[in-house]
Amino acid sequence: YSLERDLRKAVDRNEFEMYYQAKINAKTNGLVGAEALIRWNHPNGNRIFPGDFIPLAEENGMIFAITIWTFRAACEQLKRWEKGGLTTVPISVNISPEIFDRQDWVETLLQIMDETNVDPGLLELEITEGVLIQNDETFITSIETLKQSGIKISIDDFGTGYSSLLYLKKFKVDTIKIDQSFTRELLNNDVSLILKAIIRLAHELDMTVIAEGVETAEQATYLRQNECDQIQGYLISKPIPVGEFVQLLENPV
Ligand code: G
Ligand code: G
Ligand code: MN
Ligand code: NA
């Protein structure tokens, strides 16, 4: 039995499934978006979580094919909602930095949006902070090309481990996602101070701020009172299959 061998077959055999986790407006509680999170339905009956195969895929090069699959799935989902007459919300897709090694990554994403005829403004790429601090001209151009198509860019896991904030000016990112570790420690004075500074900085740069990992009503209240724009977390909803997520689209909060 080899996880790696099975993973190589998984794309072709269509064994992946996207789950969706709601993002809501912190003030109105209205649904404002969905984060797409991959699940692998292994033929042996187990559902495998991304933490157990994405790192492997990032190492063995399979991440490109998987990312293409997830991005196309998100585009097709948006079109299905649109055709079904549902109010759609933007979908964000997690992007592993390993795919940037491929020269054609931007072109491939643009091509998928073109083929599926999706509104690029309804798509957002969640990119972790680490890669953005690189001062790489090719990468900056790539992000600019994507931004010109109308797609949104979000910094995932914001605040975890990188001290240079200069990239915030270099890249015109749309959203900052405050990492769960901050949300968890929110009511601690020091963290609270940092959080308020991040929110102010983001707003001065015209960015939207979302806090992830919100699990308690106290955290939600605190974030709302401190002008955080959006929240995401188990308090609102776990990541759920698309059939369940549609009920959130049909019955706005
Ligand atoms: O869904 P879960 O909480 O288990 O996600 C664990 C990690 O896997 C998170 O860091 C998340 O960003 C990542 N992840 C989830 N779905 C995808 C995906 O489709 N592509 C990539 N590259 N990472 C994902
Ligand atoms: O790295 P990324 O931010 O994409 O990871 C999102 C991960 O966080 C997913 O694995 C998702 O299942 C998980 N997650 C989402 N909401 C919560 C939450 O409220 N609490 C905790 N502990 N994890 C969450
Ligand atoms: Mn994410
Ligand atoms: Na995150």
Image (cartoon, helix red, strand yellow):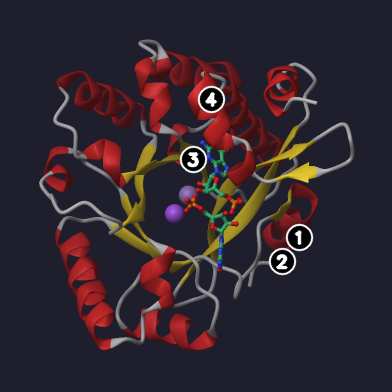
Which residue occupies 14% across, 62% down? 204
Beta carbon of the mark 4 residue lies under 8 A of ligand 1: yes
Residue 132 to residue 31: above or below = above
Q: Gap in Å between the C-alphas at discs 1 and 2?
A: 6 Å
Q: Earlier in the sequence, mark 4 or mark 1?
A: 4
Q: Earlier in the sequence, mark 3 or mark 1?
A: 3
Q: Is residue 171 left or right of residue 240?
A: left
Q: Is residue 205 left or right of residue 247?
A: left
Q: Gap in Å between the C-alphas at discs 4 and 3?
A: 11 Å
Q: Which residue is mark 4?
A: 63
Q: Which residue is mark 3?
A: 94
Beta carbon of the mark 3 residue lies under 8 A of ligand 1: yes
Check disc 1: other Cα within 10 Å, few if <14, some if 14-19, many if 20+.
few
Quarter placement of the C terminus:
bottom right
Beta carbon of the mark 2 residue lies under 8 A of ligand 2: no
Label 1–label 2 contact, CB within 8 A = yes
Q: Which residue is mark 2?
A: 251
Label 2–label 3 contact, CB within 8 A = no
